[in-house]
């Protein structure tokens, strides 16, 4: 007992010291921000990050489209020489086949549209064509000259990525024509000239090609095969032919 008494006294005094040491330690505080207690926040962060990535991709795509618009080396201005057969409406009935030729100025105004698909869809032509016909006998004949001037916008559909396309066209303008009446007799020859202008309406369809002749595509060959109708007063003329030229 004498030996146990001092030991019990030491243990009794040492217990408060151990308790005091435990009180001095920092007690962890749970603020409820752990992933186990609040699993919604990481999902929101992932969702927000996905939206940011999607917005960045859309902005990058829009930027590429704008660059595609500004980097296009082809301006869309050109011209070509036209030629073919004009089936002129004859005043005596039927058709009067004649050779025709002309010049055409082309502007691809669809290139003003930023969209890559729509910019290939529209162009417009300013056209002059000439045809002539002659009817009668050696003594009495009429020589008619037709000058047609039109402005014709067109709707163009490209065949995939190829340089070929199909187009439909409508236009308006005027026809300037004059006729020379020649009367021959044994002694003299008389010439009487009559001329005038008429309103002209044009419509038709065609196939158009624009293959590049240099690597950058800044210069292209333009060729067409087309069927056009011209209405001048009560006369209906049909033009079957094509054109060949350059477009820049």
Image (tube, grey):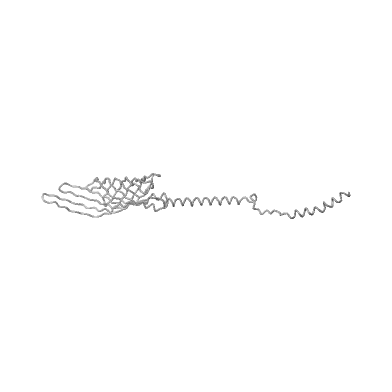
Q: Is residue 140 left or right of residue 36?
A: left
Tell which of 183 and 70 is nearer to you.
70
Q: What x and y, as percent, mark residue 76?
A: 36, 51
Across and down, in percent, residue 115 comes to 42, 51
* Left or right of residue 113: residue 172: left
Res 225 quadrant in image:
top left
| Spot occupied by residue 150 in the image (x, y as percentages of width and height) | 30, 52
Residue closer to the observer: 107 or 150: 107
The x, y position of residue 158, in whole percent, is 38, 46
Question: In the figure, is residue 189 to the left or right of 107?
Answer: left
Furthest-left residue in this view:
187
Foreground of the two, 89 or 26: 26
- Total numbered labels placed on residues in the image: 0
> Is residue 105 or residue 91 the one in the foreground?
105
């Amino acid at each position: 007992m004498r030996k146990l008494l001092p030991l019990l006294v030491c243990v009794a005094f040492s217990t408060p010291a151990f308790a005091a040491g435990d009180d001095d330690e920092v007690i962890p505080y749970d603020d409820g921000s752990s992933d186990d207690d609040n699993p919604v926040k990481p999902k929101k962060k992932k969702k927000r990050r996905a939206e940011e990535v999607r917005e960045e991709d859309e902005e990058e795509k829009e930027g590429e489209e704008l660059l595609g618009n500004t980097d296009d080396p082809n301006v869309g201005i050109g011209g070509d020489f036209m030629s073919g057969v004009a089936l002129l409406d004859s005043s005596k009935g039927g058709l009067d086949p004649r050779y025709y030729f002309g010049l055409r100025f082309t502007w691809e105004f669809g290139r003003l549209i930023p969209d890559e698909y729509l910019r290939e869809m529209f162009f417009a032509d300013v056209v002059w064509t000439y045809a002539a016909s002659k009817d009668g006998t050696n003594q009495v004949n009429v020589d008619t000259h037709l000058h047609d001037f039109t402005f014709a916008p067109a709707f163009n559909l490209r065949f995939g990525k190829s340089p070929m396309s199909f187009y439909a066209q409508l236009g308006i303008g005027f026809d300037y024509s004059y006729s020379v009446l020649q009367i021959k007799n044994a002694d003299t020859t008389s010439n009487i000239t009559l001329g005038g202008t008429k309103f002209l309406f044009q419509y038709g369809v065609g196939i158009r090609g624009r293959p590049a002749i240099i690597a950058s595509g800044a210069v292209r060959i333009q060729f067409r095969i087309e069927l056009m109708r011209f209405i001048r007063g009560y006369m209906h003329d049909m033009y079957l032919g094509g054109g060949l030229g350059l477009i820049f």
